[in-house]
Image (cartoon, rainbow, N blue to C red):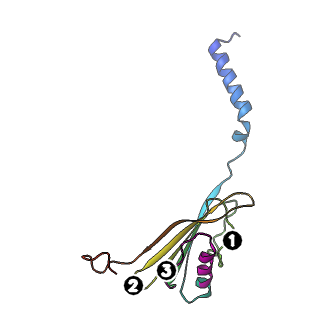
Amino acid sequence: MTRTPVSRLIGCILLIVWVVFPAAAERPADPSVTVRTVTRYVADSPEAASIAAWIDRVPGADKRTNPLGTLRVIRVRSVSGEVSTAGGPPVPLPANGVPGETITISNTLPGGIVESWTFEWVGTGGGGGWKQTHYESHAPVTQPDRPNEL
């Protein structure tokens, strides 16, 4: 049986693909799941005090400008393997994380004043740390004709 140049070329390409990429075809992808946990704590709880202390310990983080109100902690991380839905964010908050993991903390006071921080774990291997990536503080406007006065 004679082969045409085109069929030889196709055969060579298929052989190269099979030699270069066999592992990708044989092994299943490592599945990962994004886990988002949301937990609330009241101002006078030990957990709220622990969270406030954690914010104060993060180098370069904006300091709290308001007393503690209701704290909401949102932790987002990707995990591989078995996923447990039990429990919320650990308190005290973690000293370490995995690259891309985020923690957002919102402090809401009566009257609608809100202060919030977002932190992301940066670094790989044995080094890394929590870095603040976002901060905001706002209060409701009670007199629309005088928006810059609280």
Q: Marks 3 and 1, Cα distance to the nearest angstrom?
A: 23 Å
Question: Label 1: which residue?
Answer: 95
Q: Is residue 2 above or below residue 85?
A: above
Question: Label 2: which residue?
Answer: 111
What residue is at 71 percent from the left and 26 percent from the top? 15
Q: Is residue 11 above or below residue 120?
A: above
- Is disc 2 surrounded by few (<14), some (14 to 19) or many (20+) residues within 10 Å? few
Tell whether 124 sits left or right of 115: right
Disc 1 marks which amino acid? Answer: Ala
Q: Marks 3 and 2, Cα distance to the nearest angstrom?
A: 15 Å
Tell whether 106 sits left or right of 144: right
Between discs 3 and 2, the one toward the N terminus = 3
- Is disc 3 surrounded by few (<14), some (14 to 19) or many (20+) residues within 10 Å? few
Marks 3,2: beta carbons within 8 A? no
* Residue interval drawn in magenta: 49-67
Mark number for residue 54? Answer: none
Q: Nearer the viewer, residue 52 or 63?
A: 63
- Count of residue discs: 3
Question: Label 3: which residue?
Answer: 65
Disc 2 marks which amino acid? Answer: Gly
Name the spot of residue 43 as percent of width and height, x first. Answer: 53, 87
Foreground: disc 3 or disc 1:
3
